[in-house]
Structures are given as C-alpha cells and as structure tokens.
Image: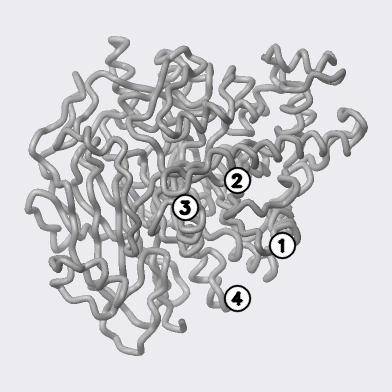
C-alpha cells in the first residue's frame, strides 16, 4: 500500500489491537439464563447496553482493510447473528445488544457510493479501480476534509454537487436501515454518523447521534464543516425541532491535547457562543474504546495509579513534539476540572460531560468486546493473533455504553443520554448506579426501596446537587452489580475533583470493598482480596469478589464553598487481557506490557456541586 494510504489510516486511527480465547474467565454463576433477558418497563429505569461507535464497509478505512461486511450485517450481528470477519473467524455475541448506532465516516459516503457501490462510468475510472485494489489515493482525495477543507471538484463527477448527491444517497440508506431494524422494546437503532475532523492527524472526531427520524438532509462532514465549531454551527441551523441531536467526542487521548483545550485547532480562543453551542450538543463524551482510555493520564494533573489502564505510551506534548503526544487537554477528568473553572468566568459550565464507552470497531461487529473471544477490530490489519501481537499490542476490544432508561425505545434512551444518566464499561456488562443527596442516611443502601428513595430525595448520575447553604457534606448512594458472564467485582471508588482558590484538585476514595474488607483510613484504598488470574491458562481465583457492592458514602473533605464533581469507578477481579489469550494460543511468552492481567472496569457519569447553583 502506498505511503499516502498509511497516512490516511493513521489519521483515522487505524493502528489498532486484538483477540483471545483459551479458558474464558467464568462469572460466579453459570449465566445461561441471561443470554436474552428482556426487562419489563420500569419507572425506576433499567440498564441497557449498546454500542454508539460502529464502522462498516461504508467507511473507506474499513473497506481498505478488507472489511466486506455491510450495515445490514452489523445490525444482524448486534442482534445476535453470526458473521465472518475479514480474518476468517466466525463470530457471534454471547448476548444481543439493546441498542446501536452505526457511525460510518460521513467523509467516506461519496467515495463509497461512487467507487465501491457505484456502477456508473465513474466507478470504472482508474482511480476507483485502484481504490478497490487497496490503493487509497482516491480515498485520500475524495476524503480530503479536516484541515484540508473542501473536496476537490475535479475529482467529483459533475463537480461538487455530484459528490454531495452521492453522499446524500448513502445518508438516506443509513436512515432507511435504522428505520427498518428498529424494534421498540427489544432493539433500538439510532441514526448517526462520525464527523472526522483532524488536527495534525490527531482526532477531533465526534459521533453525531440523532434522537428520532427527523434528521437533516445530509450528514455534514469535515470536508465542509472543517472544525468542531463549524459542526456546532451547522447543527444550530440544520437540526431544529423536532430534530434532536448529541455530538459525542471520542479519542481525546489521540487529540494531541486539543480535545479539551481552551482554543480551537486554528489556535483561536473559543468564544462564549462556541462554548454555549458545545454545552448544548456535547452532553456526553466517550471515555473508553479500542484506541484506549481517555479518562486520565499520570503526570497530567494526576498521580492516580489507575490512569494507565490500556493507555497508549505517548510522550508529553512539547514545542518540539506536537503529535502522537499527551497534554492536559487529552483527558476527560481534566475537562471536568476545566469546566468548573469556566463556570466562574462564563456563568455556565460548557464541559459538563456524561460518560459512555463504545468500540469504534471497523469490522461491522458492534459490541464484540470479550477479551477471550476477540478477533480484532480493523479487518486484516489485526485479523490474526500474530498480527495483533506484532502490530496492535496497545489496542483493546473496546467498551460498551450503558444507559438507565424506563424502556428500550429511542425516546427513552435518548432522553437518558440528554440528561447524562449513562455510564461506560471496558467491555463487561457491569451495571452502575450513583446518586447524590443531602438527606441520604447510612441505612439507605439496606432499604428495599432504596432506588425509589434515591430518586425522590436526591439526583442520579449526570445531575446537579443544588446548594443548600449548610456546611453538612452531601452523601452518595453507590451501587454496582457484576456482569454474570464475567468475573466478580472487587471494589468501587469515588473520584472527586474540585476548585480551591482557583486551583484544580482531585482525590480518589475507595468506598466499598469486596469480601468483607474495609478501605484503609489513611490511604482510602481497599486491601487486596487475594483474587488473581493465571498466566498459564487464564483461570481465575474462585470464591473471591462480589456479585453486588453498595454503600452510602459521605465526602469526608467537603467544603461547601468549593465547586466539585464526583463520579464512580468500578473494578472487577483480575482477569486476562486479550494479548495473554493470544500468546497462550500461539505458545509464546506473554508480553509484560501492557499489563497481561487487568481489572476490567466501569465509569459512572459525574454528579456536580456548585455553591452558586
């Protein structure tokens, strides 16, 4: 493949990661009964799991890695069907997903229509033929968005209007299929796409998810809306009621610090209007996916030892090193701190972000996240254990989005997304609940109606604790339940960030431990429960960990004068990473880094407190 092709693949983030499957770690219980459980409608909300970041062969970077699976195949897979991926493996989810959004790059739509699916004269041009053979010169030219701006009219049949009409044909197909596959109460589809703006090859990407069938007549791409500010302005004019939309940033860790910077990629400060549009549309952010975690980074405003989880080993951004590097704006936790500071100057917090996770699969396989059954995410680029271990070691199978909603419908799920009652996991279907309130007592977690009481007297994740003028600390109801098809839970942490005298600070508290253990009073950490996983066969320690953890925790360091946010981080017992499974399959030594044994996890959306309301 020509060098220009590698440049595009790098810009689209396609140097990925990989599979697994020796002994899969069991849960404490057999879990066959939950394979297709469908909860009844619940006014106190059910947890639904899905994937809001999925690429099919419509995305040219996916097609060029030999992914021939279609949007139809992706929907079938999400609902429990079997597909054969480019590497030859037949794969199937152990449980269907509850919801999905197919988010192919809108920058690819015209190329897909004209070259891949088209049968007109243009599809037989040398450029299209070269594209189909794996030479992506045409893909680069027809996908020349981001910093490069508009399409080249010379490369469009009939000029720019020809390319735009080609893209609209694909967009109509996206809508038609989402409408056809939607089964309210059983399986929810969202109309969506990815807007793939770039900064020096770094990701300023957004997944644009619509709440209903009232959508714009085209999916604005980075070829026309070059920067995120342009996307927000377009949404202001193109998505008016009854249209409703959220734009979800992802891969902040691959943005070279620009995802949550105070300036645009043109190095202009965001205006107040920019911040208002951002607050309106960006209610959520993707905290984890195949290209790693975006929660936090050691040395970038934190010493948190858990920030290295599936992290890509980038260096610090400097004046000399400006790409493939980290800065404070690379991480979600820093964005939350920045939001607290901006509230003091703007009068509102434009970075009040709830959390989701997803895959970013380029295999048309939404929700294919199990470490022991992973077969890659980018077609032939990581389609075998050998390729994954050689080229994609720092990638992972990705995560899932969790949503608390009364029923599995577009209206209910999208409403929860807008109010940020969402959470993300690194793959397992861990359920997480988090409530804050001023009047929660220590017995709340043991009451049979504790969820109803928490909703009545407090706020759920994604909400705001209103100031009440007293100095008593707020209390938080903390709850998590094991994925019955994964390993048990080990502990739950509260992550707190606050502003003290204009300075951002943070603290991490282990608040509930498994196996009857208690957090150390000085370090606020749970002692080890003794659970391990074997590097020889991936078996796990039996009879350790918990199926459920819950408590009421009160902030011991609360200061009513200081704005703050709180969110949960939930940890499983140790289990094998995909790279360990692949190494065992091949009979090779297990790579020492990334950590071959890991603790999968989940993150709740935050709860905010502001003394000024």
Q: Is residue 461 visible?
A: yes
| 167 sits to left or right of 281 | right
- 550, 18: nearer the viewer: 550
Q: Which numbered dot is residue 409?
A: 3
157 vs 543: above or below: above
Residue at mark 4: 346
Compare marks 1 and 4 and give the one earlier in the sequence: 1
- Marks 1, 2: nearer the viewer: 2
57 vs 200: above or below: above
Residue at mark 2: 191
Compare marks 2 and 3 and give the one earlier in the sequence: 2
Residue at mark 1: 236
Q: Are marks 2 and 4 in contact (CB under 8 Å)?
A: no
- Marks 1, 4: nearer the viewer: 1
How far apart marks 2 and 4 lie (CA) works out to 33 Å
Number of marks in the rendered image:
4
- 527, 23: nearer the viewer: 23
Q: Secondary structure at mark 1?
A: helix
- 580, 504: nearer the viewer: 580
The residue under the point 56% across, 45% down is 317
**Residue 330 on image: x %, y %:** 52, 49
**Residue 350 on image: x %, y %:** 56, 67
Q: Is residue 334 visible?
A: no
- Marks 2, 3: nearer the viewer: 3
Compare marks 2 and 4 and give the one earlier in the sequence: 2
Q: Are marks 1 and 2 in contact (CB under 8 Å)?
A: no
Q: Quadrant of residue 4?
A: top right
- Circle 1 packing at 10 Å, graded few (<14), some (14-19), many (20+), is few
How far apart marks 1 and 2 lie (CA) works out to 18 Å
**Residue 272 on image: x %, y %:** 67, 71
How far apart marks 1 and 3 lie (CA) works out to 25 Å
Q: Secondary structure at mark 4?
A: helix
């Amino acid at each position: 493949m020509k060098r220009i092709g590698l440049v595009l693949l790098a810009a689209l983030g396609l140097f990925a990661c990989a599979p697994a499957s020796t002994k899969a770690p069991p849960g404490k219980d057999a879990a066959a009964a939950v394979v297709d459980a469908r909860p009844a409608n619940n006014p106190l909300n059910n947890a639904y799991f899905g994937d809001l970041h999925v690429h099919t062969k419509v995305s040219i970077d996916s097609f060029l890695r030999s992914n021939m699976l279609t949007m139809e195949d992706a929907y079938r897979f999400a609902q429990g069907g079997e597909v054969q991926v480019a590497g030859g493996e037949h794969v199937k989810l152990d449980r269907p997903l509850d919801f999905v959004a197919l988010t192919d790059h809108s920058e690819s739509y015209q190329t897909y229509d004209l070259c891949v699916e088209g049968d007109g004269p243009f599809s037989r041009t040398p450029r299209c033929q070269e594209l189909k053979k794996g030479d992506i010169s045409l893909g680069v030219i027809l996908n020349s968005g981001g910093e490069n701006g508009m399409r080249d009219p010379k490369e469009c049949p009939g000029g720019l209007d020809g390319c735009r009409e080609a893209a609209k044909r694909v967009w109509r197909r996206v809508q038609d299929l989402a409408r056809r596959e939607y089964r309210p109460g059983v399986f929810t589809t969202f109309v969506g796409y990815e807007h793939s703006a770039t900064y020096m090859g770094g990701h300023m990407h957004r997944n644009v998810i619509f709440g209903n069938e009232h959508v714009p007549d085209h999916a604005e791409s980075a070829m026309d809306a070059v920067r995120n500010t342009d996307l927000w302005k377009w949404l202001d004019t193109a998505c008016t009621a009854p249209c409703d939309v959220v734009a979800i940033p992802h891969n902040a860790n691959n943005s070279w610090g620009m995802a949550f910077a105070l300036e645009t990629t043109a190095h202009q400060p965001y205006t107040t209007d920019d911040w208002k549009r951002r607050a309106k549309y960006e209610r959520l952010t993707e905290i984890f996916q195949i290209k790693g975690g975006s929660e936090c980074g050691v040395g970038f405003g934190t010493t948190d030892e858990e920030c290295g989880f599936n992290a890509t080993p980038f260096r610090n951004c400097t004046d000399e090193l400006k790409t493939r590097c980290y800065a404070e704006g690379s991480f979600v936790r820093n964005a939350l701190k920045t939001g607290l500071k901006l509230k003091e100057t703007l009068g509102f917090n434009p970075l009040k972000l709830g959390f989701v996770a997803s895959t970013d699969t380029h295999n048309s396989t939404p929700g294919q996240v199990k470490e022991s059954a992973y077969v890659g995410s980018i077609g032939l680029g990581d389609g075998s254990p050998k390729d994954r271990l050689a080229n994609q070691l720092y990638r992972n199978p990705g995560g899932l989005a969790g949503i608390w909603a009364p029923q599995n419908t577009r209206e209910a799920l999208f409403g929860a997304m807008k109010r940020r009652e969402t959470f993300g996991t690194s793959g397992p279907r861990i359920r997480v609940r988090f409530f804050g309130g001023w009047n929660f007592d220590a017995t709340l977690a043991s009451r049979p109606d504790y969820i109803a009481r928490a909703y009545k007297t407090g706020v759920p994740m994604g909400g705001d604790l209103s100031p009440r003028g007293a100095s008593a600390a707020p209390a938080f109801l903390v709850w998590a339940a094991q994925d019955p098809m994964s390993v048990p839970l080990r502990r739950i942490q509260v992550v707190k960030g606050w502003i003290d005298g204009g300075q951002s600070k943070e603290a991490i508290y282990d608040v509930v431990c498994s196996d009857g253990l208690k957090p150390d009073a000085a370090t606020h950490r749970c002692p080890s429960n003794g659970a391990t996983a074997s590097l020889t066969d991936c078996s796990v320690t039996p009879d350790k960990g918990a199926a459920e953890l819950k408590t009421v925790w009160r902030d011991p360091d609360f200061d009513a004068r200081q704005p703050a946010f709180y969110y949960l981080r939930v940890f499983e017992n140790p289990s094998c990473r995909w790279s360990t499974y692949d190494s065992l399959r091949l009979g090779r030594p297990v790579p020492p880094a990334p950590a071959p044994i890991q603790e999968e996890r989940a993150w709740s959306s935050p709860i905010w407190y502001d003394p000024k309301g």
